[in-house]
Image (cartoon, rainbow, N blue to C red):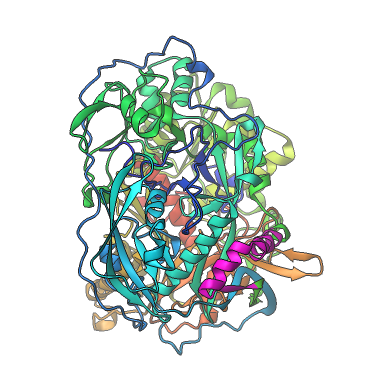
Amino acid sequence: MDPAGRARGRSRGRGRGDEVETTRRPDLAQQHGIAPYSTQPPHLAGRSRGGMTQESEGRGHGPPSSFTNTSGSGGRATSGSSSRDTPQEPSYGPSVPGGGRASLAPRGGPAAPPQVPSARAPPPGVVAPRASGDAAASMGRGASRGREQRDVQIYTRPSAEFVKLGKTGSPLPVTSNYFELIKRPDMHLLQYRVDFTPDVDHIGVRKALIRVHENVLGKYLFDGTLLYNVTRLAQPLELHSKRVSDDSDVMVSFRLVGEIHKEDATYTSVMNIILRRCLGMLNLTMWKRDYYDPAALTEIPQHFLNVWPGYLTTIRHHEDGFLLGVEIIHKVLRRDTALDVMDRLRQSGGDIQALCKAELLGKVVMTHYNKKTYRIDDVDFTKNPRSTFHLRKEDRDISYMEYYQTRYSLSVRNASQPMLVSLPSRRDKNRGDDQPVYLIPELCGMTGLSDDQKKNFNLMKDVGNITRVMPDKRVDALMKFRKRLADNPKIQEELNSWGLDFAKNIVSCNARIIPAQTIQQGGNSFPTQEGDWSRNIQRSRMCVSVELQDWVVFTPSAMMQEITPFVNMMKQVGAQQGFNIPQPEYINMQMDRTSNYVEAIRAECGRKQFSLIFCVLRAARADTYASIKKMTISEFGIPSQVITGRNIKGQPGKLMSIATKVMIQVASKLGAEPWRVAVPQTKWMVIGYDTYHDARQRKAVGAFVASINPTFSRYYSSVKIHENNEEISPSFKDHLFGALKSYYIMNEKTLPEKIIVYRDGVGAGDIARLKDTEVAALREACSDAGARTNYLGTGVYNPPIAFIVVSKRINTRFFAMGQRGASNPPCGTVVDNKVTLNERFDFFLVSQKVTQGTVSPTSYNVIEDDTGIAPDIHQRLAYALTHLYYNWPGTLRIPAPIQYAHKLAYLVGESMMTQPHEGLNRLPYYL
């Protein structure tokens, strides 16, 4: 396959380790977009699907310009590095110039015949059309270009008359990062599918080839595949253009596929195209689908990083009309290539091939020449840039070095480097791309911060100081963006010509502050203060304690002096909270290899039954951690706690705080309930579900947790490993049946009256399939449970179910406006109007207090609900559940059941990849 071909996605990842959340507040880590630092200007050949370009999106603005290195210092002018400027080239293993073959088959198929678009909104639960005519079928390449076309509309609001506004709480006026559309286009548009013969990959070249025919096309919009205009073109229409790069002739054909009226859903896409066209006039650089301002970059020279500010924009219909959403985003740019990483590994010594695969496999790189991203699935040490592949367009064999020299004018400096291999995904195979892509490491920039960089406190702090924008600064940036649009004559001319205009100020919303929750402990209760009660719990007894009997500590002999006083601190703080910790058995190990821990644990567990395994590591080691967890949780069914040496060293005051958190974590793993939240005593079951995908996208782990008591403080858990890497769970029926069985046993042979599910990790495009698969499986499990238990003598059990999709990665922000300017709204702020979506039963909830940056609300989308629960109760219940995560004495961004599912899915997916012991399914051993 063409090395410039298929782009690849990314996988999700989360933090690991028992003690991670004992020292760091969960859910507050900022998500930074990471991308490589460009060392070569991209050339026009090769279309970049989701790449970076600086070309204007409109016609008549001159030829597209290339992206170049704009850093003021530290940037390399070429793709080489000083270590590779020497005549001698490093050896990476056997180098056999082979006959690697790669296909250059054109993508996209024949278009379907046109259909008549519909302007009517579908009934609840039906997918709304995103393009009129047969656009969805005929678009082919670029069909999902633009965020506004990826947001599939699913009507989940029960009815148009349904009122989703809550009532509880004190009112709070807030503003949000949206601008109202005070004027929008009112034109009858024609939609044409545009094809090029021979095929042209690069979107900038496509636009340039069409731009020369403006006198024929009239006023138009073109997104790379679809063209919109007001002039009816002759059918069929074929025009001829000349490509400047090679002076070749290209035939451009236009086929009418639809007509668009103002009421059509596709008109939203048209408005977004107009907006992106205007952004192209601001001299911004487009990276994937967002725009960044290289002129405003901030350098972090001590870490060889640059940070670019940018804008994420979208126009969409909300509650009362169309709004322009603008989010201030950042891109962190690295300067090293995959070859740089290989060189560093080679200098460290050892088996270079094994080291390179261990470091690079699963990582994502971005090619410098076309800004596409690829996942590394293998490193082929039998091939190098001198190896050849078959170039189908010219029907000849060509070396990779010659290919990049002729197509991109790039000279490869190191001819002996191995080749990176990117295998086709299921989506690639579906469109005919079934061959691997071979990439030259020297031309591939690394994306994402490395593990060492993430562990660098000073680096992360310096990056966070730039990317965490305070509310007042964020509002200022929004207003400056609006002013840039207003002050640019070309943009105003463009907007006026289409009849599009935006309000001068951001929108205002009516928010409410839900009353503070009351935390209950043994004989004591108190209201939460700004979502934190860490000080209060140190002086109060747990709601429900447990008895810790025999437990054992495995520690290297060198750590004995540190762990003994730490255990004594745990005993002291445990006694204050009603959790009595006896003296443990200490197992001193002379060596601390993984095998030493495994052998010692196996020997001791074979000799005696323990309630808890406690392991001390000199430093964090993923292999040792995984082996301990796999053995204790899967093989022996014993809760375990792992702690590293750095957490048991330091000042007494700091150690006391860590000892308290570790003690609570240990007690919780054994079944204790450190605190509860005052909630009405109901026979409801709340469920949390999340999916973990491994770095190589080979398997997925679905984790399910369900409450089994009225206070939502005890949970049943189950795990399923998805061999086909599904996001939508095929095992929901089994999960819920097991949970209902535990609930039945724990609650005097009764079953829950209502079931509320909180589901994480699902995009809007998967909601329809979610309802057909997971929601349907829930109802089947209930029916089976009723029949198995002969419930209430009838065997019929069909409880009302509410299914709620919870999203953290959203772009909506809220600002409390006061005399001192914008600030973060307080904990418990809920917004269910103005910026919510008209087709949904949804709301936004701010459940955490942040002191750095702008707080991120959480979106709750109720996609199925026959419980009759009022919107007010949904909002208050979601907020109450953010208080019940026992790894943190404070509120979370998401309900506790989802966070428990996060932890369980990550533990099994990252460290075990095997089923936990069945005897642990009613204990939160995964904390």
Please name whichever residue, 291 or 394, is drawn nearer the observer in this view of the structure.
Answer: 394
Residue 4 image point, x, y percent: 34, 39
Name the residue: 51% across, 69% down.
315
Figure check: 824 above or below 917: below
Locate the N terminus by quadrant.
top left
Q: Position of residue 413 (x, y in %)?
A: 42, 20
| Predominant secondary structure, magenta span | helix
Q: For residue 869, say whether it is visible.
A: yes
For residue 852, above or below residue 247: below
Q: Is residue 475 magenta?
A: yes
Residue sitting farthest toward the right = 819
| Residue 441 picture quarter | top left
209 lies above or below 913:
below
Highlighted range, magenta:
474-503
Would you place residue 223 above or below residue 114 in this image?
above
Q: Quadrant of residue 470?
A: bottom right
Q: Position of residue 91 (x, y in %)?
A: 37, 13
Q: Nearer the viewer, residue 648 or 425?
A: 425
The furthest residue to the left: 395
Observer-nearest residue: 56 or 475? 56
**Is residue 500 highlighted in magenta?**
yes
Q: In this rendering, would 88 be left or right of 721?
A: right
Residue at (36% x, 22% y) in the render = 354
**Is residue 917 at all visible to an observer of this figure?**
no
| In this picture, residue 307 sits left or right of residue 450 | right
Q: Residue at x 60, y 84 (%)?
A: 167
The image shows a total of numbered marks equal to: 0
